[in-house]
Amino acid sequence: MTTPQFKQLRRSYGFDEVAIVPGEVTINPDQTNIDLPIGDFTFSIPILASAMDAVTNVDFAIRYGKLGGLAVLNLDGVQTRYDDPEEVLGQIAGASNSKVTALMQKVYSAPIKENLIAERIQAIKKGGVVCAVSAVPANTKRLAPIAEAAGADIFAVQSSITSARHLSKSVRGLIFEELCQAVSMPIMVGNCCSYGACLELMRTGIHGVLVGVGPGAACTTRQVLGVGIPQITATIDCAAARDLYLKESGRYVPIITDGGFRNGGDLCKAFAAGADAVMLGSIFAQTEGAPGKGYHWGMSHPHPTLPRGTRIKVGTTGTLEQVLFGPTSVTDGSQNLVGALRTAMGVCGAASIAEMHNAEMVIAPAITTEGKSWQISQS
């Protein structure tokens, strides 16, 4: 007697389970084009710095913007709650493991000050770079107009999981079509990890989708809630949604794979899987001068009774320039990320990010261990 099937599961893949196949034609890495367009803006580095308090503050946003990238400032974080965020960041970095969660719940319960939103944005703009900011959906309708009036260029709506259709007790929740009409800034929305959710978000008129639920180094969503899809599969599915939407509308909406990256190999695999850009947190938190002071925490807005993030010690491994362009001082692939991407594109014969999407990939669970017994034993 056969047992009736209640659910059919499909296999999904993370970074360690796949590999990129070299192309039959190769090109010089310095001939590759890795530009990232978002709305009317174009960035020479297709790597975004995440909207986390341990990663992005005014100083980091300016430094990274001058190098060609885009850092996203968290409007729900300590930068807009405290006149002196450095003091608060120092408290979080210095707290013991047993007390840090309670401390963060207290820290993030302080009210957001609208005057600080304007001050932080204007400071970034004074630095001469594009200013991107982020808020959770519940705060977006209030904060987006304030951010636009202060001079912000790009607005991201971010939460652990964001969908185009959300049911709540509020009379009228956040509607992305209306948001896109209400403000002139390009709108990025995240996070999602499925074909259907990504397609619906794009159909609302937004300008970018952040892909990834729970893969971040300091995120515990997968452990606490059990939700998420490994990043390679999530990226492939959302890339398919992007391509269908392009056929439907003639409008190209970039997808940004957000979270789970440890090294250049992971980053390159994301682009081969279909990403137009990636968003990094912990790797940037390791740079000299990062706001987290050698620590990183994944939750910018802790739930008062169900924390879904944790503070981790990442240390300081090098400068921002080293992480992006080298020369490397480590052998784990966490530095010279731009060089890694250009080299991978070169060996795949991809002159652009769009061509990198066509690189062949294979299921390869031994890709990180094959022939590496000495490295593994000495790690």
Image (tube, rainbow, N blue to C red):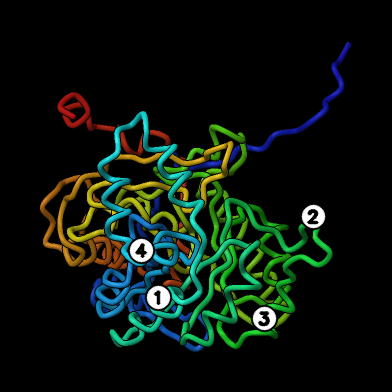
Q: Which amino acid does label 1 sit on?
A: Ser
- Among the 4 quarters of the image, the one containing residue 176: bottom right
Q: How crowded is mark 3: few (under 14 residues within 10 Å), some or many (20 or more)?
A: some
Tell me the residue at 48%/67% (across/down): 75
Residue that mark 4 sits on? 348
Q: Are marks 1 and 2 in contact (CB under 8 Å)?
A: no
- Which is closer to the viewer, label 4 or label 1? 1
* Amino acid found under the numbered disc labelled 2: Ser
Point out the tag, 1 or 3, that comes first from the N-terminus: 3
Q: Image point 61% across, 52% down: which residue?
A: 193
Foreground: disc 4 or disc 2: 2
Residue 251 lies in quadrant = bottom right
**Residue drawn at (46%, 87%), measured in percent from left and top?**
151
N-term mark: 1 or 2: 2
Q: Is residue 326 visible?
A: yes
- Left or right for 100, reference 166: left
Q: Mark 2 points at which residue?
A: 168
Label 3 to label 2, Cα distance in Å?
Answer: 21 Å
Q: Residues within 10 Å of mark 1 (few under 14, many from 20)?
A: some
Q: Is mark 1 on a helix, strand or loop?
A: loop
Q: How far apart are marks 1 and 2 (CA)?
A: 42 Å
Q: Is 165 in front, or is 143? A: 143
**Of marks 3 and 2, which one's residue comes earlier in the chain?**
2
Q: Which residue in the structure is indicated by mark 1? A: 352
- Residue 312 locus on image (x, y percent): 33, 40
Classify residue 85 as left or right of residue 317. Answer: right
Q: Provide the residue designation for mark 3.
A: 180
Residue 308: image location, x then y, percent: 52, 40
Give the mark nearest the N terminus, 3 or 4: 3
Provide the secondary structure element on which disc 4 rests: loop
Q: Earlier in the sequence, mark 4 or mark 2?
A: 2
| Cβ atoms under marks 3 and 4 closer than 8 Å | no
